[in-house]
Amino acid sequence: MSFSRLIRTVQLGLKSLMLHKLRSGLTMLGIVFGVFSVIAMLAIGEGASAQAQKQIVALGATNIIVRSIKPVEGSSSDTSQGGTPRYGLLRSDFRRLTKTIPTVLDAIPIRELPREARFLRHTMNCRLVGCTAEYVAINHLGLLKGRFLTDADQQNLANVVVLASDVATKLFPTEDPLGKALQVDSMYYTVIGVTADRTPSAGIGGSLAAQDFNKDLYIPINTFRVRLGDQIFTPKQGGMDSEYVELNQITLSVKTVDDVLKTADAVRGTLEKFHTQKDFAVVVPLELLKQADQLRQIFNIVLGSIAAISLIVGGIGIMNIMLATVTERTREIGIRRALGARQRDIIEQFLTETVVLSGSGGLLGVGLGLMTPYAFLLIRWVTFNFILDTKRGTLSETTRMFSEMQPTVALWSLPLAFGISVGIGILFGLYPAHAAAKLDPIEALRHE
Amino acid sequence: MKLAAQVVDLTKFYDLGPAIPVAGANDELQYAPIAANEGRILVKALRGVSIDFPEGDFVAVMGSSGSGKSTLLNVLGGLDRPTTGHYVLGGEDVSQMDDVELSHVRNQKIGFIFQSYNLIMQYTVLENIELPLQYRPGYPALSAADHEWCLNLAKKVGLGDRLDHRPFQLSGGQQQRVAVARSMVNDPEIILADEPTGNLDSATGIEIMEMLWALNREGRTIIMVTHEHDIAEWAKRQIVMRDGLVHKETRTRPVHDTSDPVPHRRMASANV
Ligand SMILES: Nc1ncnc2c1ncn2[C@@H]1O[C@H](COP(=O)(O)OP(=O)(O)O)[C@@H](O)[C@H]1O
Ligand SMILES: [Mg+2]
């Protein structure tokens, strides 16, 4: 079909469609909403996965995180220290990992405990984190004020602390925290710095629970060991509970993303050799990233299929109308055939008409689809203000996710959805077009 | 004399399916056009028709209902294929062409005028006249010359001031004029008119006949089906069909006669 002829056929199609504006419009609506829902569903899927990805990337794609985990109750636990359960990563593990695996670039040992911090009459439940100078680099942590821990602080067993931003604002609402003495338990630490805000991570994979880094207090890990020790007593009903843990976490970093997986394997292998019980877990953000990507694909396929069903319904609507149109225009078909139209010409005419109908519906649907983020904002606003009677502070994990999610219209979904709408037009237009072409010209001319 | 069209021994049978035996009935049906043949019922709409249509002739085909007029016209118009026999149009045997070839023949060699005008409702007068150009071989775009040509045809049938009207805004006579103009667009070998005045009052019918006669005087070959004797008088030759055969044929005027065809008008003008 030459271009000028295509233009002519399209014009012809438009003319016939304009003859029944309401009918054409209503038929088109089916496609409009089908295309819209394809784009919207994919946008929501993208938004959800983008959020998960952001969190995983925040953990660092070139990092490997090894966490101590309490072995399952009942399994043989090492109780050499007089009934105190003893588990988790050891300082010897840390030395072994950094010495024997050449791809490890940096490593930080981490110790952490929930503790109450106090300054004058302000108190706050914080997480006391013992770490080293490299912590700030590996976690891409910014500094708001002062400095972070240094190697010298480690060696000197300095009583210094770096505050996360929330802690600084809560405990020092009016004054500058730098140089002030912060009390944790019975000990005092001099504040030397404040870190920048850091988005909390959601729980990803069993061993890495949701973390809120904004309630952290960072002290040198050597100081932690000297001041608090490895054996920690926690008061419980009728006495004291105690457990012995040397390190809660070791964060390793490698040079490139390519090194991540084999290093993770080496880490697992090394640790398994020296641990008789399953008291550690290796978390690889890169693997999580890949899982999240797979999850996104599944999400997209499921949501996309649901949307595709609405497109098919739209297509059936088009086919229905086109069949009615063919019957209604039998006479016209007869006239065209008598004046020299081949069967192919009739097929092309009706097919073009269907495709113009579904294609314009598709274009409108794409336009609507671009509005998805705004539509989503509206739905969220209505949900939070009229349906879920919740204050922001009391949100559960899922509602928090819903409240922070930003649907992003995937650019590739626009031509895809439009293409599908055209495809639907062709698919559902073929039968009516063939029915029109197969009419006997003589009978078609006789048709009232 | 050069022939515009010629049919030789044309038959057209419609197969109505297997014959159902009826107790007590004759094995052979007596009525000629319907016959049981090898256990099937055949309607013999045409049973061997041979007619020559010289270039420039104006033929009226008459006959009672069911005599085969429409069937003949459908074959002549390339809308239907004969069962047996030959149909030569402009020197080419078109009797067993396939649909694509026949479409081409309809577009290039035949001009149709129907009883019920058969215009396309969503098109303007001009667009209706241009319609056959849409299906020209090679599908060229409409040129300025094409446009001019269609405009002239519209003026020729007296619709120069109605170009943008749509069929429902026109009277029956005006619609039939559009059809006449449309039939001329591709400069056909023959013009086929199926009861062109059947839906018109007699005065308007005469206007249309004047127009057909004018076309014939220019040398166009016209084959017209009609019931009405005074309409048939406009033609130069009258063919009467009966039971699928040519029953009677009369030539009232020679092929190249250009005199006024209507006797009473001739007399009226002689009296002045
Ligand atoms: N499609 C068809 N199927 C069966 N019989 C047909 C068909 N078309 C015409 N006939 C029969 O053929 C005969 C001739 O019909 P037709 O050519 O329409 O006659 P006319 O136009 O002279 O009235 C009639 O008996 C008619 O019933
Ligand atoms: Mg008839």
Image: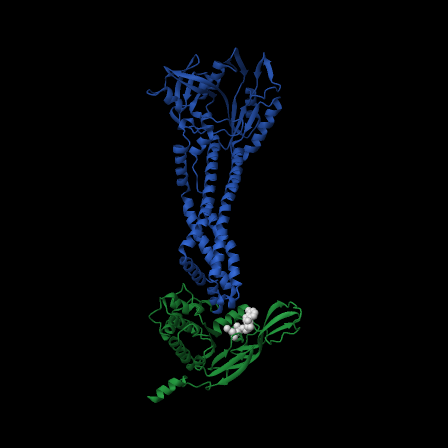
Chain colours: A blue, B green
Residue B11: percent from the left, percent from the top? 58, 76
Residue A324: percent from the left, percent from the top? 48, 57
Q: Give whichever of A242, A315 is nearer the camera.
A: A315
Asked whether residue A412 is in view, the answer is no
Considering every residue shown, the one lying at the far top of the view is A239
Image position of B97 (left or right of B119): right
Q: Give whichever of A228, B163 is nearer the camera.
A: B163
Q: Give whichever of A79, A240 is nearer the camera.
A: A240
Asked whether residue A244 is in view, the answer is yes
Residue A291's place in the image compared with A127, above or below, is below
Residue B210's place in the image compared with A377, above or below, is below
Residue B160: percent from the left, percent from the top? 34, 71
- Residue at the image point whose x is 51% and y is 81% from the top: B239
Residue B48's place in the image compared with A205, above or below, is below
* Quarter holding residue B30: bottom right
Considering every residue shown, the one lying at the far bottom of the view is B271
- How many numbered badges does the structure rendering display? 0
Q: Give whichever of B228, B258 is nearer the camera.
A: B228
Ligand 1, seen in the image, is in the quarter at bottom right
Image position of A173 (left or right of A280): left
Residue A259: percent from the left, percent from the top? 54, 33
